[in-house]
Amino acid sequence: MYITKLKIDGFKNLKGIALAPHKRLNIFCGDNAQGKTNLIEAIWLCSGVRSFRSTKDKDMIILGGESMDIGLSFKDKQREQDIRYRMTRANLKEKLCTLNGVKLKAPSKLFGSFDCVVFTPEDLELSKGSPEKRRQFTDLCAAQIKNSYRDVSDKYETVLEQRNMLLKSIGYGRASKDELDVWDIQMSQLGAYVSMLRYSYSKKLAVYASRLYGEISSGKERLELEYSSTVFSKLEGREDYRSDLAVEYLEVLKRSRDEDIRLGFTTKGVHRDDLVAYINGLPARDFASQGQHRSIALVLKLAQANILIDETDEAPVFLLDDVLSELDPSRQEFVLSKIDNMQVFITCCDENIPENKTGKMYRIRDGRTV
């Protein structure tokens, strides 16, 4: 999969961008605050996922402008497709999003058509950051290969919010404990499905990440990944999420009710789970060095891309936003060698194409290519 045409106008500070990217390597150079990351963000939005910068809708439109427009054409193994993403300041809620000329209900409906992997400096904190970051990473990865997963995880978050509100009401004496039944049944069914798919994906991730980490450490260190569930002591070999897993999940919720009411939130569930990394048997979050944490983050992102290739038979577009400058030369070379078969977009400050690589170099200044 690769982008053949890219047009951006009015997205943040970008103006009149019109490119025919190289099929492999595309480097965007420029000083800070010139629009390099905005270009990566615009591409990412066409994957149907929310901005990795948590940009608000009103801030997507150029200052003083009335609209923003992103047009992206990409080619997969079957055909060339076109995405259009447009928004006006007068009606921020009404986003015009089309795929091959067909209007979609929401930008999220683009998800699954155009696959990207984005790697930002913030992702280098993936290993030592909060469990929430790793849950979000795992959920996005799992959804990329199982489209139904995203809807289920979104519904789970809605049910969780309702259950937590009810727990507070019960604690204040304004509701009955029995009212939890309807929410617990829904949460157990949705949570069982999420648990099974997260566990299944984490096993695939562990295989790739372990091999890649062995390479980056020259075989001196061993990486293991483990999905840590607050509900299930064992998930291996269990696939009956409608009955077996859902029943156990429900029992856990019922046992924790009194504690949940006392605290005012749900203490057990997939929203409290984690993806735990071990280096040579020791928990990475507690014992890994800064360099080891960065290596773990690198191999997780590379593993995500490799799994996408395996599952979809398509290489994703790989977006590297100012990450290479954060890495030492050996890690830079390692990353570039592992994404050599993909179309890559790199933002940086240095006007250098890596050795033995062919591609296109673009200079970004004041939101334009020059």
Image (spheres, helix red, strand yellow):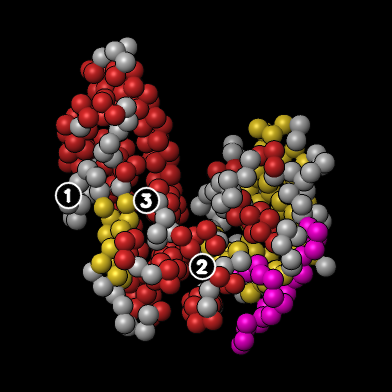
Whether residue 101 is visible, yes or no, is no
Sequence-wise, the earlier of marks 1 and 3 is 3
- Looking at the rendered structure, the kind of residue marked 1 is Ser
Q: Position of residue 26 (x, y in %)?
A: 67, 72
- Amino acid type at circle 3 is Pro
Label 2 secondary element: loop
Q: Residues within 10 Å of mark 3 (few under 14, many from 20)?
A: some
Residue 52 drawn at (x, y percent)? 56, 51
Asked if the stretch drawn in magenta spans residue 276, the answer is no
Q: In which image quadrant can residue 1 be found?
A: bottom right
Q: Mark 2 sits on what residue?
A: 315
Q: Residue at x 20, y 52 (%)?
A: 235
Instruction: Between residue 303 and residue 262, name the one nearer to us.
Output: 262
Residue occupying the far top of the picture = 174
Could you tell me how far apart the alpha carbons at marks 1 and 2 are, in whole angstroms? Answer: 35 Å
Is residue 165 depicted above or below 223 in this figure? above
State left or right for residue 221 relative to residue 345: left
Q: Are marks 1 and 3 in contact (CB under 8 Å)?
A: no
Q: Horizontally, is 250 left or right of 308 in the view?
A: left
Q: Is residue 235 above or below residue 61?
A: below
> How many residues crowd mark 1 within 10 Å: few (<14), some (14–19), many (20+)?
few
> Is residue 286 in sight in this rendering?
yes
- Amino acid tagged 2: Ala
- Between residues 310 and 201, which one lies in front from this camera angle? 201
Residue 233's label in the rendered image is: 1
